[in-house]
Image (spheres, rainbow, N blue to C red):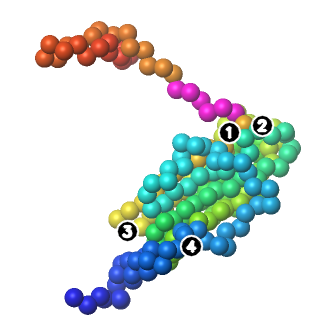
């Protein structure tokens, strides 16, 4: 059966097969990085390396001083070609201003796997109680990606409260299932 190259899906798959067959690394060489790169992702929980798209927010670990400029980077990795546009939005809490970069950006479609680094420079006039939130959205025919990453200004990630297993121990078919969790109504 001949391959119909007029179909955008067939062309995308052909480019993907060629890229994978040639051993492309999946990282674009023209990614701009700040001179002083931040240490690690601000949210470890949101940096999944599984799937065709992943993202992270990278920033300094230590608590900044009021008035000090901070460099944050939104990292978006697309492992497969996509004709969809990626939307990257940065929401700032009160008391924080955006010094460099745009709070709402669109990354163009990609015809090969690549990684983009979106650079933001922010300056808190005071250290806020709320977080900076980076939202990454990608919508295409039959698929989508949505992620939210937080920068906490050096504050620790909140720990969810422990579940208290103080309810009755139900039994099923003669087996004790252990203490249950009481649910408040």
Determine whether label 4 and label 3 are within 8 Å by CB. no
Which residue has dot 3 on it? 141
Q: Quadrant of residue 171?
A: top left
Determine whether label 1 and label 4 are within 8 Å by CB. no
Q: Quadrant of residue 119?
A: bottom right
Which of disc 2 and disc 1 is earlier in sequence?
Answer: 2
Foreground: 11 or 109? Answer: 11
Tell me the SS state at disc 2.
loop
Which of disc 2 and disc 4 is earlier in sequence?
Answer: 2
Which residue has dot 2 on it? 63
Q: Which mark is residue 2?
A: none
Q: Residues within 10 Å of mark 3 (few under 14, many from 20)?
A: few
Which residue has dot 1 on it? 152
How far from the left and from the top, in percent, is residue 183? 36, 17
Mark 4 and mark 2: Cα distance apart in space: 34 Å
Which residue has dot 4 on it? 108
Which of disc 3 and disc 4 is earlier in sequence?
Answer: 4
Mark 4 and mark 3: Cα distance apart in space: 16 Å
Q: Residue at x 61, y 58 (%)?
A: 75
- Residue 112 higher or lower than 181, as above or below: below
Q: Which segment is the magenta one?
A: 155-160
How far from the left and from the top, in percent, is residue 105? 63, 64
Mark 3 and mark 1: Cα distance apart in space: 34 Å
Q: Quadrant of residue 37?
A: bottom right
């Amino acid at each position: 059966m001949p391959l119909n190259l007029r179909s955008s899906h067939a062309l995308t798959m052909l480019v993907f097969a060629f890229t994978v067959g040639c051993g492309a690394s999946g990282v674009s060489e023209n990614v701009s990085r700040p001179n002083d790169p931040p240490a690690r992702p601000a949210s470890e929980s949101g940096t999944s390396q599984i799937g065709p798209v992943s993202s992270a927010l990278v920033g300094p670990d230590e608590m900044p001083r009021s008035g000090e400029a901070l460099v944050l980077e939104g990292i978006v990795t697309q492992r497969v070609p996509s004709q969809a546009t990626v939307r990257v939005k940065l929401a700032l809490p009160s008391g924080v201003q955006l010094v460099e970069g745009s709070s709402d950006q669109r990354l163009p479609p990609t015809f090969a796997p690549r990684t983009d680094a979106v650079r933001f420079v922010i300056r808190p006039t005071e250290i806020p109680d709320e977080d900076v939130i980076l939202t990454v959205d990608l919508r295409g025919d039959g698929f989508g990606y949505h992620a939210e990453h937080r920068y906490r200004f050096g504050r620790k990630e909140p720990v969810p409260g422990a579940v208290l297993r103080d309810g009755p121990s139900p039994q099923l078919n003669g087996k004790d299932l252990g203490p249950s969790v009481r649910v408040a109504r």
